[in-house]
Image: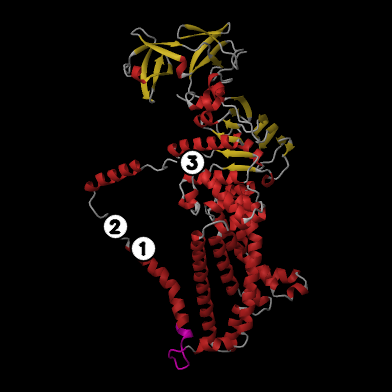
């Protein structure tokens, strides 16, 4: 896993530039669908110019939160405040929020230029202004030469870039991105991801980005709000989220981890015959039987004919190779440098050890947690 | 900006195609489905034989030979022009009321009440199962005299009769586009419902709208029971009255003219739609 390396860390730790972006405050949002509580007293503040990602599994409420912010969903409780103005009862069309949707949402009867100019037309801008602004925005997303094309004549990536230009044309207070990359293939997705991030930083526009793709989140967002069952699990920078996940849910959602059964005693656990302190967080109050959650890079292995594990699988990832080491009943993922992995054969016995300074524990799957 | 498509992928696919070719037996074998032709022939005969009979009869002269006399006499036949004008007026009124009523309803059901779609399917089909005579007798018994004195009361009845066809056309058209996303996109850009319907929804369901319009037109020009009981001489009523009183050839000529007229209108409407689509796609710049 290379998510915390290179640009990702730089992006994650970047301070949002001073901007005219809006401050968004979600206060105790409640939204229910029948018996399902999609948003359960959700509170979150997004700073001006910040790129906030909402991450979580399907049904966690992230899209509902975005739709509430856009004005497409009515609230059962709570408030949406933008720059001190309560927008809870304001119609979606008067909220000044640009939105890019998951499915291609360009108007099929309009060409790219007319699509981008649509919001300006609704704001009664003159034809000259509409054309100038729409052309500028298409240039900004690299599609100036496609202005006369209709949606059906463009690729998915091009359509989403036009949709982005269309959302930005109205100079929105907040840019809302509802999984805009999920329908694209990997290469286009990576390219558009960089383009969105670079545009957002250039324009310093407050942005809320919904996704279930951890790679997108870690590479694009200033901060990430991890959600589960309508509630916030953790709000942190991508680097912090990866390195110091507050809950087992966050650990499972961000990065890869292996669960190893342990017994907690005096805030310590013994993993691979090695004593490790328990990391502060959700599981620090647990005692007795639990699971320790280990990142692939938390573990090192040594070739040892008497080692407690043996290699069952190798996956080449470029600079790193991921090994699956069977330790007793438990398969454990370990990342090693590829040149070193080349020396390791499948079935070879190894001795795993923990190189992290502390470990995160969680209630054992299928058991009742003991406090 | 790097190119989004990769030539190498295409090359590989092409190479694979070429690699497979030596193992294929050249031209793919086509199974002859002779029964399809038979079914087509039977269905064609079922529709065309009555039309042929009607056309032949209308083109028959007094002496039994070929003649356009019936068609020539038609415009000057007593009551024909008035009946045609009335039918056209009723058709236009029905199309307008039907569109104004059904388009927002169908959009509302699709966007806000998608769970009601099945119920709407049932409700909108009711006019087909309720005989027109039941509807018109009820209406004539209930409505005040001033309403019955206007032929446009028929239009409102025709709206009900046309509802199954109009709603289904619109339902299919709206189902073919991502209506929810398009309307939300429009609203987030500042469009109110009226502008969203006018600028975004209607242009994208134009074929469905045209189909609904043509069906409504055909229905109005073919409806007899209600017009006859409401004592208005529309084209179908005139045809039957004329048959009783005068020349059967003219009556059949009127029927054939109505049929051909509807077909011409249908072709015209479809061609107009196609040329407009082509023109708007060629159009450049902000409108």
Q: CA distance from mark 1 to mark 3?
A: 40 Å
In the rendered image, residues at marks 2 and 3 fall on the same chain: no
Report crowding for label 1: few under 14, some 14 to 19, many 20 or more residues within 10 A (C-alpha): few
Occupied quadrant, residue A340: top left
Q: CA distance from mark 2 to mark 3?
A: 37 Å
Q: Which mark is residue B258?
A: none
Where, quadrant-wise, is the N terminus of chain A in this rendering? top left
Residue depicted at x 48% and y 45%: A158
Q: Quadrant of the C terminus of chain A?
A: top right
Q: Position of residue A192 (x, y in %)?
A: 49, 38
**Chain to which mark 2 belongs:** B
Chain name for mark 1: B
Residue A190 horizontal side relative to residue B189, left or right: left
Among the two numbered marks 2 and 1 on one chain, the one whose residue lies closer to the N terminus = 2
Magenta segment, which residues?
Answer: B56-67
Mark 2 — residue?
Answer: B30
Asked if disc 2 and disc 3 are in contact, CB closer than 8 Å, the reply is no
Q: Position of residue A221 (x, y in %)?
A: 56, 30
In terms of depth relative to the viewer, which is nearer, A95 or A303?
Answer: A95
Residue A349 vertical placement versus B126 (above, below): above
Residue for badge 1 = B36
Question: Where in the figure is residue A284, as x and y percent of width and height?
Answer: 60, 13
Decide whether residue B144 is among the magenta residues.
Answer: no
Alpha-carbon neighbours of circle 3 within 10 Å: few (<14), some, or many (≥20)? some
Mark 1 and mark 2 in contact (Cβ < 8 Å)? no
Please state which of the two labelled residues, at mark 2 or mark 1, is closer to the viewer: 2
Q: Is residue A42 above or below residue B180?
A: above
Asked whether residue B61 is drawn in magenta, I would say yes
Chain on which label 3 sits: A
Tag shown at residue A183: 3
Q: Secondary structure at mark 1?
A: helix
Judged by its main secondary structure, the magenta piece is loop
């Amino acid at each position: 896993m290379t998510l915390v390396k290179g640009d990702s860390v730089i992006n994650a730790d970047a301070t949002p530039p001073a901007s005219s972006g809006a401050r968004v405050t979600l206060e105790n949002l409640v939204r229910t669908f029948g018996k399902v509580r999609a948003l359960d007293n959700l509170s979150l503040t997004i700073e001006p110019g910040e790129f906030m990602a909402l991450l979580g599994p399907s049904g966690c409420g992230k899209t509902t939160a975005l739709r509430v912010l856009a004005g497409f969903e009515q609230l059962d409780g709570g408030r949406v405040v933008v720059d001190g103005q309560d927008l809870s009862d304001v119609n979606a069309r008067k909220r000044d929020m640009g939105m890019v949707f998951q499915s291609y949402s360009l108007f099929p009867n309009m060409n790219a230029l007319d699509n981008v100019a649509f919001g300006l037309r609704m704001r009664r801008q003159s034809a000259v202004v509409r054309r100038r602004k729409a052309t500028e925005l298409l240039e900004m997303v690299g599609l100036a030469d496609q202005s006369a094309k209709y949606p059906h004549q463009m690729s998915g990536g091009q359509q989403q870039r036009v949709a982005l230009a269309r959302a930005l044309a109205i100079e929105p207070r907040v840019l809302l991105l509802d999984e805009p990359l999920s329908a694209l293939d990997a290469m286009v997705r990576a390219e558009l991801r960089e383009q969105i991030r670079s545009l957002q930083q250039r324009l310093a526009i407050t942005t809320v980005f919904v996704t279930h793709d951890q790679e997108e989140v870690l590479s694009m967002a200033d901060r990430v709000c991890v959600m589960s069952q309508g509630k916030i699990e953790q709000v942190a920078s991508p680097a912090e989220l990866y390195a110091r996940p507050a809950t087992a849910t966050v650990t499972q959602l961000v990065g890869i981890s292996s669960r190893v059964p342990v017994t907690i005693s005096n805030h310590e656990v013994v993993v691979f015959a090695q004593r490790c302190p328990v990391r502060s967080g959700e599981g620090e109050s647990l005692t007795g039987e639990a699971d320790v959650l280990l990142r692939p890079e938390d573990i090192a292995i040594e070739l040892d004919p008497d080692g407690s594990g043996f290699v069952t699988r190798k996956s080449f990832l470029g600079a790193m190779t991921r090994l699956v080491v069977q330790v007793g009943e438990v398969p454990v993922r370990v990342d090693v440098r590829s040149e070193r992995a080349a020396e390791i054969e499948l079935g070879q016995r190894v001795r795993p050890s923990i190189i992290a300074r502390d470990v995160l524990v969680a209630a054992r799957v299928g058991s009742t947690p003991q406090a | 900006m790097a190119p989004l498509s990769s030539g190498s992928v295409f090359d590989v696919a092409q190479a694979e195609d070429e690699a497979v070719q030596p193992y294929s037996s050249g031209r793919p074998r086509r199974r002859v489905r002779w029964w399809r032709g038979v079914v087509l022939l039977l269905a064609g005969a079922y529709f065309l034989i009555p039309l042929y009979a009607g056309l032949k009869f209308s083109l028959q002269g007094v002496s039994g030979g070929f003649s356009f006399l019936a068609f020539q006499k038609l415009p000057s036949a007593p009551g024909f022009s008035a009946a045609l004008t009335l039918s056209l007026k009723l058709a236009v009124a029905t199309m307008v009321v039907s569109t104004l009523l059904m388009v927002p309803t169908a959009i509302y059901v699709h966007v806000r009440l998608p769970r009601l779609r099945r119920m709407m399917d049932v409700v909108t089909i009711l006019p087909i199962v309720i005989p027109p005579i039941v509807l018109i007798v009820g209406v004539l018994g209930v409505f005040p005299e001033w309403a019955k004195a206007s032929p446009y009361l028929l239009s409102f009845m025709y709206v009900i009769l046309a509802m199954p066809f109009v709603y289904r056309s619109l339902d299919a058209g709206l189902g073919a586009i991502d209506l929810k996303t398009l309307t939300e996109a429009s609203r987030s850009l500042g469009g109110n419902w009226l502008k969203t319907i006018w600028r975004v929804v209607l242009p994208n369901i134009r074929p469905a709208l045209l189909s609904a319009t043509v069906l409504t037109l055909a229905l109005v020009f073919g409806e007899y029971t209600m017009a006859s009981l409401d004592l208005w001489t529309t084209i179908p009523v005139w045809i039957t009255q004329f048959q009783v009183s005068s020349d059967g050839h003219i009556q059949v000529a009127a029927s054939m003219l109505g049929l051909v007229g509807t077909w011409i209108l249908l072709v015209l409407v479809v061609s107009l739609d196609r040329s407009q689509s082509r023109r708007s796609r060629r159009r450049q710049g902000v409108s």
